[in-house]
Image (cartoon, rainbow, N blue to C red):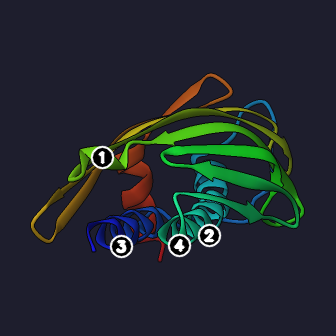
Amino acid sequence: MKKLAMALLLTGVLLAGCGGSDDEDSPTAPTEAEVAGLSRVMVAAMREAFVASLISDTTSVPGTRGSVEIAGGNWNFVGYSPDGKLTIDGMLVVDEAKYPEIPIKGTLQLKGSQEGTLVVDMLVKVQGLEITSTGTFVLNGETYDVAELIAAGASSG
């Protein structure tokens, strides 16, 4: 039951970060709207991985190409494309054993609709019914505050 609650919680937190626009992509200097759009694609990918991790600690989530290989808290993105436009390689470590404060860290290489390196360093905190996320996304050397991206996504609907 704890694993189900944690997976649903993280999915909800990531969904709260959805937002952004369909502005043209810039591989060297993404705008916050482009990062929010990228987060929308990442949310879809992570949602599938969370659901799969409920079924088994070791599993594979296929994309339109490639897969996310889940082994416990290690999520290895192998040529994974959630939408056929973006391809993701790299690994995230989701330290679910630290619930209710769940660190998510890792480095992902992006190709296609967005190019570059995405470094994820965030902490999801649960206090009763309140869920907060702090930390940073660094995309191509530009740092974005996770809480600000979530707030921007929530305000844009």
Amino acid type for the residue under numbered disc 1:
Ala
Mark 2 sits on what residue? 48
Q: Quadrant of the N terminus?
A: bottom left
Mark 3 sits on what residue? 4
The residue at the point 62 percent across, 22 percent down is 141
- What is the C-alpha distance between the residues marked 3 and 4? 9 Å
User: Which corner quadrant of the image does residue 116 belong to?
Assistant: top right
Left/right placement of residue 155 relative to residue 34 reads left
Mark 4 sits on what residue? 55
Q: Give the numbered dot on residue 97.
A: 1
Crowd band around label 1 with a 10 angstrom C-alpha radius: few (<14), some (14–19), many (20+): few
Whether the residues at callouts 1 and 4 have beta carbons within 8 Å, the answer is: no
- What is the C-alpha distance between the residues marked 2 and 3? 14 Å
Give the mark nearer the N terminus: 2 vs 1.
2
Whether the residues at callouts 3 and 4 have beta carbons within 8 Å, the answer is: no
Amino acid type for the residue under numbered disc 4:
Ile
Give the mark nearer the N terminus: 2 vs 3.
3
The mark tally for this picture is 4
Whether the residues at callouts 2 and 1 have beta carbons within 8 Å, the answer is: no
- Counting from the top left corner in percent of width and height, residue 122 is at 39, 39
Q: Nearer the viewer, residue 102 or 139?
A: 102
Q: Secondary structure at mark 1?
A: helix
